[in-house]
Amino acid sequence: MICETNNEADMREAMHELGLRALRASRALAVADSASRTRWLHAMADALERDTDIILAANAEDLAEAKQNGLDAPKLERLTLTPERVKDVADALRHVAGLDDPVGRILSSVTRPNGLRIDKVSVPIGVIAIIYESRPNVTVDAAGLCIKSGNAVILRGGSEAFRSNNAFAKCISDAGVAAGMPEGALQLVPFKGHAAVSAMLKMNDCINMVIPRGGERLIRAVVEQATMPVIKHYKGVCHIFVDHVCDQDQALTIIENAKCQRPSVCNALETILIDASIAPEFAPKLAARLAQLGVTMHGDEAFTKLAAPVAVVPATEEDWPKEYGSLDVTVGIVDGVKKAVDHINRYGSGHSDSILTTDEANAQFFLDNVDSAAVYWNASTRFTDGGEFGMGAEMGISTDKFHARGPMGLPELTSYKYKIYGTGQIRS
């Protein structure tokens, strides 16, 4: 439900109580057995299919308001739910339920000379807050991954999907609690305003980690305010390097997929680098293919000359680190794989980068030296995704190097602790 209050102190108190409920639930979740968590998720999935009409009615209200507010067509499409999409969300939840349990794994075990046995064991993180935009299915996807990994979750979706998110959250929370899940394990922030988010980001006594999912502006705002760790990526400036020897037809197909399939997502291609030795042959082919697809090319001087008569916009220094999120791409010519790696490490965002080559030595050099979360050999960057990596529904992608990097799955939603077994040892 929507909570309205003009009193900031009341809102902060309500948010803190929400956080305390999540904290209490996280203690119970941490010791819940795998069978119980799996049972809760199946109950949630069944409830989604049973309550589809309720969910679609809430979504229809969101859509009507969004149209009145002038929301653009792509965002309306992301907001729209159908019976088929609700069924897909339920099936995704069942898939998560069937994944291997990430909790309670013995990561390492050692017995010290004094007889102490030290086990390093995976445990839930605790309470995870997730802030996201547009897609209401994230409410269920994120909640499912958190519950499966033994974490309590606080969800804050975009205001344009508030009713849809609330319908999803109430459905799966009620179903989970009815099946034995602790109260407070899954909660939706009941306030629409930004003040509630600001309050939540100061609740480090209740919340262990925040995951923002959305544009760079949202992520930077969260990082600036949060008093707890934030899992994030700011940009997806993804590169493809076309090496001096490669299957050129395959390269064109991979580039088309990486750039054009979904140009607005963070794993879409933004920069193409071509080895100088094949540029006279490959650049005209590339220019013709991209022009046919409606892609605007921002090229360096060498590529622009080779692309003629295809029109190319002269690239500026600001274009190389740019995440377009559209049918635009920057193209440049480089002298070999080492120069390509230097360029990517300078201008890239540490997200996803690919080399297209039949030269194994160059491929391994690229894979070893490009400092990104995901590096590819002869494949599209579009695979950097939790689902495509077999991790279940998408939780987020991290370009950080601490705790989690790349697509986040169930193991990345756990921490660890040491369990030490003794027989009376004392330290001398």
Image (cartoon, rainbow, N blue to C red):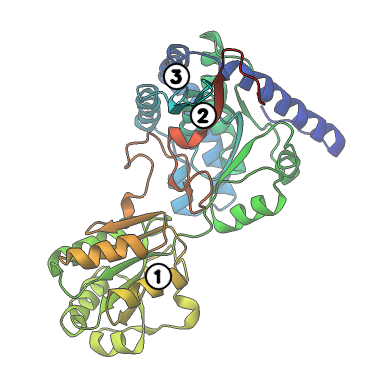
Residue pictured at 30% horizontal, 70% vertical: 294
Q: Residues within 10 Å of mark 1 (few under 14, many from 20)?
A: many
Identify the mark nearer the N-term, 3 or 1.
3
* Circle nearer the viewer, 3 or 1: 1
Q: Amino acid at mark 3?
A: Leu
Task: Answer yes or no: is residue 366 visible.
Answer: yes
Rounded to the nearest angstrom, the CA distance separating label 2 from label 1 is: 34 Å
Residue pictured at 21% horizontal, 59% vertical: 378
- x, y percent for residue 312: 33, 83
Residue 130 vertical position relative to residue 316 in the rendered view, above or below = above
Residue pictured at 52% horizontal, 54% vertical: 233
Find numbered disc 1 in the image and state the secondary structure of the residue it sits on. Answer: helix
- x, y percent for residue 321: 47, 71
Residue 325 vertical position relative to residue 297 in the rendered view, above or below = above
Find numbered disc 2 in the image and state the secondary structure of the residue it sits on. Answer: helix
Identify the mark nearer the N-term, 3 or 2.
3
Find numbered disc 3 in the image and state the secondary structure of the residue it sits on. Answer: helix
Q: Which residue is label 3 attached to?
A: 41
Q: Residues within 10 Å of mark 2 (few under 14, many from 20)?
A: many
* Circle nearer the viewer, 3 or 2: 2
Q: Amino acid at mark 2?
A: Cys
> Looking at the rendering, in which quadrant would you find the N terminus?
top right
Identify the mark nearer the N-term, 2 or 1.
2
Which mark is on residue 344? Answer: 1
Residue 207 vertical position relative to residue 341 in the rendered view, above or below = above
Image quarter of residue 29? top right
Rounded to the nearest angstrom, the CA distance separating label 3 from label 2 is: 11 Å
Residue pictured at 44% horizontal, 67% vertical: 348
Q: Which residue is label 2 attached to?
A: 146
Q: Amino acid at mark 1?
A: Ile
